[in-house]
Structures are given as C-alpha cells and as structure tokens.
Image (cartoon, rainbow, N blue to C red):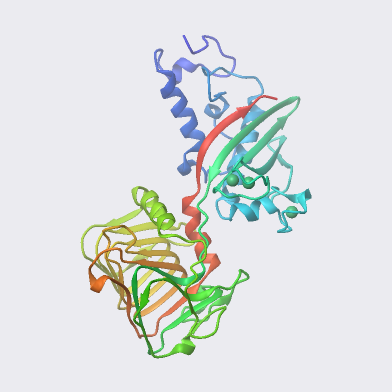
Amino acid sequence: MLIPKHSKRLTFGALFPVGTPWFSLRSIVLGRISHPRHRQRSHNRPTRLDGLRCPIVGPPVFWFGSEAFYIAEAGIERAYVEVSSKNLNSVLAGVDGNKNNTTDNGILAFGASVPFAGGTYEVKVTDNNDGDGDIWNDTDGKAYITSTGRFGSSTRVIRVLVSRANLNFNAAITVIDEKCRTNQGGSAVVDGHDFTYNPSQQNNNPIRGSGPDVHAIARSCTTNNDDIKKPNQITGSGISPDITSDIGSLTLASVRSLRDDLIPRADIVYHGSTHLNGGTLGTRDAPKITYVDDILVLEGNVTGVGFLIVDKDFEVKGNFTYEGIILVGICPTCPGRIHGTGNAKMYGATVLANPTSSHDEEARIENMTGNSSIYYSTYGIDLALKRTFKTVGWQELMN
Ligand SMILES: [Ca+2]
Ligand SMILES: [Ca+2]
Ligand SMILES: [Ca+2]
C-alpha cells in the first residue's frame, strides 16, 4: 500500500480510489505543478492538493509544513512568468546584466525574498551542469529555478529544471540554401536595427529597441541571383545594401529541430493551401504557434504574435502585422519561398530555406516590392521564444 491510511491534511482515498497506481498519482501531482497550462495560475493560496509531498522517487506521503510547500510553489510559479519571457543568460546575469558581478546573479525582478501568505519565498535561478564550466553562462537552454518556502519553523525547497530555446539571429531575414535569390524594390524595407512595433502608430513608426543591431539579410548560400532596386532600403549594422554571408551561430539543423518541436504544440493549424482574409494569430499577452503545412496567402488585415511556420510559399497581399519568428520552408521536403510581402510589417526574425528542387532549387524572396517593412526585433523574438519555455524536471530537495 503506497498511500498512508491516515493523514492529518486530507483523506487521500476521497481523491484517489485505493489501487490508483503510483505512476498515475505521480503524473497527476507533477502535472498539477509543472504543466505549462497551469503556470499562469494566480498567486492565490494554492489548493490543498498542492500540499501533497511528491518526491521524484518513492511513494507519496503527507508532510507537515505544507504551508511552506504552498509558498515555495507560489515562488516557482511567479518565477515562470519572468523566466519564460527572458533569455536565460540575462536571467543568470541578474538585473545588472553582468554575470561577473555575481551578487545579483539569478535573482529575479521581484527580489531575493518575498513575503507571501504569512511566510516568505526565496527564488534563485542557477545554471545546470551544461559542460562549459561556467555556472553563470547557459549553453544548453536549460537552468534550474529553486524556490525555498518558509512558514513558521517549516522550510520546503522545490527545484525545477526549465528549458527555453535560445536562437541567435544575425539578421532580420536569414536565408539558408545552395542557391538564393532576392528581388526587392518599391518601398520595401528590410532593417537589421533593433525595433519594437508601436501599436499606437500602426502605420510604421516603430520604437527603437535596446538590443544589439544585426544585419538586414544574412545568407548561407553558394550562389546568389539578386535584383536589388533600392539598396538604401536594406539597412542594418553593415553598409547598405546590408546583406552578409555570416548567419552567425544559427544552423538549419537547429531551426529544423525547433520547428519539429513546435508543430505538435501548435495552437493554430491549417492544412492545405490556405488563404486568410483576416484574423488574429496570437497577441502579445498570448503568443501563438501557427502552422501551415502548405502555401499561406494573407489578404485583408491579419495580425499575429508568436511563431508562424509555413512549409511552402508564403505570400502577403494585404496588411499583415506580426511580432515573432517566421519560419518558411525549413523541413527537408519543404519548398519554401517568400512570394511577396505586400503591406507586411514584420518585427522579429524570419528564416527561409528551400531544401527541395522546386523553384529552380532556389530559396527565393520574390516581389518584395510593396510597402513592406521587415524589422529585426529582439522584443518580437522574445515574445515567440516565450512559447518554447517548458519544465523538464521537478524535485523537492531535502533540507
Ligand atoms: Ca550580475
Ligand atoms: Ca553553464
Ligand atoms: Ca544551462
């Protein structure tokens, strides 16, 4: 019998019939704590179910000091809100942004110790053992959040291992292929300076961001077949037209891996050739993963925030405002092409690849000749990467 027959906290049998297997109990309890859908829970006093002590190994037993446990968990949930929104290295470096000044390292914006429900929680983020020998530098997209809950004489400590994708873009548009083509003119702008979309001035008056500037276009291509009519509208950290062959640390394999990880978790999925005449593909408060397994044509007014994954042609004909990461034609059988940018205002990063033999084997950016503006935006990128945040491990530490 795994379940204690007598409990001072609550009657277990009322919740789970005798004979409920341990692995079910564990998944129920762990799921309650770590499932992403539960992370936005308000910081009201947690439910009694949260008082179950559930170590990684061994049967569940009830534990005195559950108030301290509630409080520790509240600290974890508050940490999720902040850590999911930021690059792990910026979290590890602390508010001063300097990992070498370790006093504030891993302390979140709400402080080292927070009064809560008659006790306190203390939360700190530390790196896992990711092989670089630096406890304040993340190289594998994973880190620990440790929360110590105190109530009276009781202390409980919860530690979770979280992950968040960390893609570094070297341009507003990155193209990875053997053969590449860019066709630009009209009023089309590509800008590698860091900008943030300004919703109060929708027709293109973005706010300058504080992140590092990158290039307008970065291409890893063996041959290029370009038609650039307005080189001064392709600007960034380099000389206009700011097109570099340095795509930084980004690899097609890393982008493909992220794409494959995101698709099963997509919030919005379109099958077959898709035309949208309007709609919302996510908001700043709720970024979404949108997946189209074929052609996507946007007409009318479409807005969105998050990830937009398109396996074939991507074409904007109408007004399109998007903050986030757009992936076009990334998979080995995906004939990606940017077929036109219309009146698109895109803030974040876009990656284009065409690993197939269609479109003359080229990764093409065609008809970038309207009134489109494609900006690099660290703000937009972070909104998207927030959706890659997840809990990969949970444990209660003995103290
Ligand atoms: Ca610091
Ligand atoms: Ca490290
Ligand atoms: Ca790490």
**Height in image: 397 above or below 360?**
above
Query: Would you say 119 lies left or right of 272 here?
Result: right
- As drawn, the residue found furthest toward the front would be 222
Which residue occupies 56% across, 24% down? 55
Point out residue 236 in the picture as x, y percentages from the top left corner: 54, 79
Q: For the C terminus, give its image quadrant.
A: top right
Q: Quadrant of ligand 1?
A: bottom right
Q: 220 or 198: nearer the eye?
A: 220
Which residue occupies 72% across, 31% down? 150
Among the 4 quarters of the image, the one containing residue 299: bottom left
**Height in image: 75 above or below 190?**
above
Q: 395 or 215: nearer the eye?
A: 215
Viewer can see residue 50: yes
Point out residue 365 in the picture as x, y percentages from the top left corner: 34, 77
Among the 4 quarters of the image, the one containing residue 358: bottom left
Point out residue 145 in the picture as x, y percentages from the top left corner: 62, 41
- As drawn, the residue found furthest toward the left would be 272
Query: Would you say 190 lies left or right of 42 here?
Result: left
Point out residue 121 in the picture as x, y percentages from the top left corner: 69, 38
